[in-house]
Image (tube, rainbow, N blue to C red):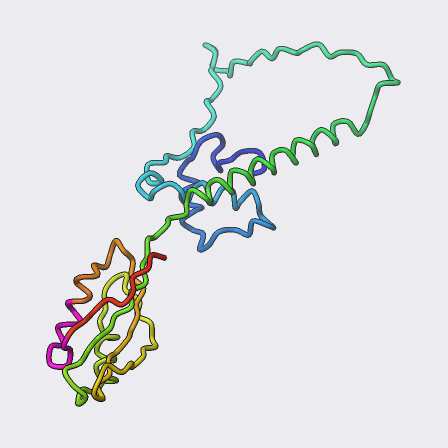
Amino acid sequence: MLQKDIWLGGQQPSAADREAFEAMNEAPNPATEPNAFAWYSIVSKFSPQVRASWQAAKPAAPAKENKKGGKKEEKKKEEPKAKKDDDDFDPFADEEEDEEAEKAKMARMKEIAKTAKSYGKVVIAKSLIIFEVKPWGEETDLDALAKKILGIEMDGLFWKTEYKKEPIAYGVFKIVIGATVEDDKVSTDELQEKIEAFEEEVQSVDIAAFNKL
Protein backbone atom coordinates (compact mmCIF):
# COMPACT_ATOMS: atom_id res chain seq x y z
CA MET A 1 0.00 0.00 0.00
CA LEU A 2 2.86 2.39 0.84
CA GLN A 3 4.21 1.96 -2.68
CA LYS A 4 1.55 4.36 -4.00
CA ASP A 5 0.66 6.57 -1.01
CA ILE A 6 2.60 8.07 1.90
CA TRP A 7 -0.16 7.16 4.39
CA LEU A 8 -1.93 3.85 4.96
CA GLY A 9 -5.28 5.56 4.51
CA GLY A 10 -4.36 7.33 1.28
CA GLN A 11 -3.48 11.00 0.99
CA GLN A 12 -3.84 11.94 4.68
CA PRO A 13 -3.06 10.33 8.07
CA SER A 14 -5.78 8.22 9.66
CA ALA A 15 -6.46 5.92 12.60
CA ALA A 16 -4.95 3.11 10.56
CA ASP A 17 -1.58 4.86 10.62
CA ARG A 18 -1.81 5.43 14.37
CA GLU A 19 -2.79 1.81 15.14
CA ALA A 20 -0.07 0.38 12.89
CA PHE A 21 2.57 2.68 14.41
CA GLU A 22 1.61 1.80 18.00
CA ALA A 23 1.75 -1.90 17.18
CA MET A 24 5.38 -1.67 16.00
CA ASN A 25 8.19 -2.18 18.51
CA GLU A 26 10.92 -0.61 16.39
CA ALA A 27 11.50 1.14 13.08
CA PRO A 28 11.58 -1.00 9.91
CA ASN A 29 14.90 -1.70 8.23
CA PRO A 30 15.56 1.18 5.76
CA ALA A 31 17.59 -1.09 3.50
CA THR A 32 14.95 -3.80 3.07
CA GLU A 33 11.79 -1.76 3.73
CA PRO A 34 12.48 1.82 2.59
CA ASN A 35 8.80 2.71 2.11
CA ALA A 36 7.79 1.44 5.55
CA PHE A 37 10.81 3.12 7.14
CA ALA A 38 9.95 6.49 5.54
CA TRP A 39 6.34 6.15 6.71
CA TYR A 40 7.47 5.20 10.25
CA SER A 41 9.87 8.16 10.42
CA ILE A 42 7.14 10.63 9.40
CA VAL A 43 4.53 9.25 11.82
CA SER A 44 7.01 9.29 14.73
CA LYS A 45 7.41 13.06 14.38
CA PHE A 46 3.82 13.63 15.45
CA SER A 47 3.04 13.75 19.17
CA PRO A 48 0.73 11.10 20.72
CA GLN A 49 -1.94 13.81 21.13
CA VAL A 50 -1.86 14.64 17.43
CA ARG A 51 -1.93 10.96 16.43
CA ALA A 52 -4.89 10.40 18.73
CA SER A 53 -6.88 12.97 16.73
CA TRP A 54 -6.49 11.03 13.47
CA GLN A 55 -9.82 9.64 12.38
CA ALA A 56 -10.61 6.53 10.38
CA ALA A 57 -10.14 6.88 6.64
CA LYS A 58 -13.30 8.07 4.93
CA PRO A 59 -14.99 5.39 2.80
CA ALA A 60 -15.78 6.11 -0.81
CA ALA A 61 -19.13 7.86 -1.30
CA PRO A 62 -21.90 5.46 -2.40
CA ALA A 63 -23.40 5.85 -5.85
CA LYS A 64 -26.62 7.90 -6.01
CA GLU A 65 -29.87 6.03 -6.55
CA ASN A 66 -32.46 7.08 -9.08
CA LYS A 67 -36.17 7.38 -8.33
CA LYS A 68 -36.82 3.77 -9.34
CA GLY A 69 -34.47 2.49 -6.64
CA GLY A 70 -31.69 1.50 -8.95
CA LYS A 71 -28.20 2.92 -8.79
CA LYS A 72 -27.61 5.80 -11.09
CA GLU A 73 -24.98 4.92 -13.59
CA GLU A 74 -22.10 7.31 -13.81
CA LYS A 75 -21.26 8.44 -17.27
CA LYS A 76 -17.68 7.96 -18.14
CA LYS A 77 -16.11 10.13 -20.73
CA GLU A 78 -13.93 8.20 -23.00
CA GLU A 79 -11.02 10.11 -24.31
CA PRO A 80 -10.25 9.46 -27.90
CA LYS A 81 -7.21 7.31 -28.24
CA ALA A 82 -4.57 8.53 -30.56
CA LYS A 83 -3.93 6.12 -33.32
CA LYS A 84 -0.44 4.81 -33.63
CA ASP A 85 1.18 3.23 -36.53
CA ASP A 86 2.24 -0.35 -36.13
CA ASP A 87 5.83 0.76 -36.66
CA ASP A 88 5.66 3.04 -33.57
CA PHE A 89 4.38 0.33 -31.17
CA ASP A 90 6.77 -0.37 -28.30
CA PRO A 91 5.73 -3.26 -26.00
CA PHE A 92 8.28 -2.24 -23.34
CA ALA A 93 7.40 1.46 -23.16
CA ASP A 94 4.94 1.14 -20.25
CA GLU A 95 7.33 -1.07 -18.30
CA GLU A 96 10.18 1.43 -18.69
CA GLU A 97 7.96 4.32 -17.62
CA ASP A 98 6.82 2.39 -14.53
CA GLU A 99 10.42 1.65 -13.56
CA GLU A 100 11.43 5.29 -13.91
CA ALA A 101 8.42 6.42 -11.87
CA GLU A 102 9.22 3.85 -9.16
CA LYS A 103 12.87 4.99 -9.03
CA ALA A 104 11.80 8.63 -8.71
CA LYS A 105 9.36 7.73 -5.94
CA MET A 106 11.96 5.70 -4.04
CA ALA A 107 14.39 8.61 -4.19
CA ARG A 108 11.68 10.95 -2.89
CA MET A 109 10.77 8.61 -0.03
CA LYS A 110 14.42 8.32 1.00
CA GLU A 111 14.72 12.12 1.07
CA ILE A 112 11.56 12.34 3.21
CA ALA A 113 12.94 9.72 5.62
CA LYS A 114 16.30 11.47 5.81
CA THR A 115 14.65 14.85 6.51
CA ALA A 116 12.27 13.40 9.07
CA LYS A 117 15.11 11.63 10.84
CA SER A 118 17.17 14.81 11.06
CA TYR A 119 14.21 16.75 12.46
CA GLY A 120 13.73 14.07 15.10
CA LYS A 121 17.20 14.51 16.61
CA VAL A 122 17.22 16.30 19.94
CA VAL A 123 20.54 17.75 21.05
CA ILE A 124 21.01 17.45 24.82
CA ALA A 125 23.47 19.92 26.31
CA LYS A 126 25.94 18.14 28.61
CA SER A 127 28.96 19.13 30.66
CA LEU A 128 31.91 17.28 32.18
CA ILE A 129 32.77 18.40 35.73
CA ILE A 130 35.89 17.43 37.67
CA PHE A 131 35.60 17.88 41.45
CA GLU A 132 38.41 18.07 44.00
CA VAL A 133 37.18 16.90 47.38
CA LYS A 134 39.43 17.71 50.33
CA PRO A 135 38.99 15.77 53.59
CA TRP A 136 39.57 17.05 57.13
CA GLY A 137 42.66 14.98 57.66
CA GLU A 138 44.66 11.89 56.89
CA GLU A 139 42.38 9.78 59.10
CA THR A 140 39.51 10.11 56.60
CA ASP A 141 38.80 6.92 54.65
CA LEU A 142 38.89 8.28 51.10
CA ASP A 143 37.57 5.08 49.53
CA ALA A 144 34.53 5.11 51.81
CA LEU A 145 34.00 8.81 51.06
CA ALA A 146 34.27 8.22 47.31
CA LYS A 147 31.67 5.47 47.62
CA LYS A 148 29.30 7.94 49.30
CA ILE A 149 29.86 10.50 46.55
CA LEU A 150 29.23 7.94 43.81
CA GLY A 151 26.02 7.06 45.62
CA ILE A 152 24.57 10.52 44.99
CA GLU A 153 21.78 10.14 42.42
CA MET A 154 20.13 12.85 40.35
CA ASP A 155 18.21 12.73 37.09
CA GLY A 156 20.75 13.60 34.38
CA LEU A 157 23.81 12.83 36.56
CA PHE A 158 26.33 10.19 35.44
CA TRP A 159 29.37 9.61 37.66
CA LYS A 160 32.72 8.39 36.34
CA THR A 161 33.31 5.11 38.13
CA GLU A 162 37.04 5.75 38.54
CA TYR A 163 38.54 8.38 40.85
CA LYS A 164 42.04 9.42 41.88
CA LYS A 165 43.76 10.25 45.15
CA GLU A 166 46.22 13.10 44.88
CA PRO A 167 48.48 14.38 47.66
CA ILE A 168 47.88 17.79 49.22
CA ALA A 169 50.43 18.09 52.05
CA TYR A 170 51.60 16.39 55.22
CA GLY A 171 50.31 13.00 54.19
CA VAL A 172 46.80 14.29 53.38
CA PHE A 173 45.25 13.31 50.06
CA LYS A 174 42.28 14.68 48.13
CA ILE A 175 39.78 12.87 45.90
CA VAL A 176 39.60 13.86 42.23
CA ILE A 177 36.33 12.60 40.78
CA GLY A 178 34.38 13.42 37.62
CA ALA A 179 30.79 13.37 36.42
CA THR A 180 28.84 14.08 33.23
CA VAL A 181 25.65 16.09 33.74
CA GLU A 182 22.73 17.18 31.57
CA ASP A 183 22.71 20.95 31.91
CA ASP A 184 18.92 21.31 31.92
CA LYS A 185 18.48 18.78 34.71
CA VAL A 186 21.46 19.09 37.05
CA SER A 187 22.55 22.22 38.88
CA THR A 188 26.29 22.29 39.51
CA ASP A 189 25.81 24.23 42.75
CA GLU A 190 23.26 21.73 44.02
CA LEU A 191 25.55 18.81 43.22
CA GLN A 192 28.45 20.51 44.98
CA GLU A 193 26.25 21.09 48.04
CA LYS A 194 25.31 17.40 48.12
CA ILE A 195 29.00 16.46 48.32
CA GLU A 196 29.65 19.09 51.00
CA ALA A 197 26.76 17.60 52.98
CA PHE A 198 29.16 14.84 54.08
CA GLU A 199 30.52 17.43 56.49
CA GLU A 200 32.14 14.96 58.87
CA GLU A 201 34.54 13.83 56.14
CA VAL A 202 34.55 16.74 53.65
CA GLN A 203 36.37 19.98 54.40
CA SER A 204 35.81 21.60 50.98
CA VAL A 205 34.77 20.92 47.40
CA ASP A 206 36.31 22.74 44.44
CA ILE A 207 35.60 22.49 40.71
CA ALA A 208 38.91 21.68 39.01
CA ALA A 209 37.52 21.64 35.47
CA PHE A 210 34.23 22.36 33.70
CA ASN A 211 33.91 21.49 30.01
CA LYS A 212 30.88 21.61 27.70
CA LEU A 213 30.38 18.45 25.66
Q: Is residue 74 at least partly visible in the picture? A: yes
Report x, y in % for residue 77. Answer: 62, 10
Residue positioned 58% across, 48% down in the render: 33
**Label total for image:** 0
Which residues make up the magenta segment?
A: 193-203
Question: In this orientation, which residue lies closer to the viewer: 75 or 161?
Answer: 161
Residue 144 lies left or right of residue 79; in this view the side is left
Please state if 161 lies on the left or on the right of 102 as rendered. left
The furthest residue to the left? 200
Residue 47 in percent (x, y) is at: 34, 42
Asked whether residue 1 appears in the rendered view, the answer is no
Percent x, y of residue 161 = 33, 75
Q: Residue at x 73, y 12 (%)?
A: 81
- Quadrant where the N terminus lies? top right
Q: Quadrant of the C terminus?
A: bottom left
**Residue at image coords 16%, 73%:** 204
Residue 189 lies, in percent from the top left, at 17, 61
User: Residue 104 or 3: which is nearer the viewer?
Assistant: 104
Lateral position of residue 155 relative to residue 213, left or right: left
Magenta span has 195? yes
Residue farthest to the right, as pictured: 87
Let me know if residue 143 is in the magenta part: no
Choose between 56 and 202: the one closer to the eye.
Answer: 202
Q: Residue at x 47, y 22 (%)?
A: 62
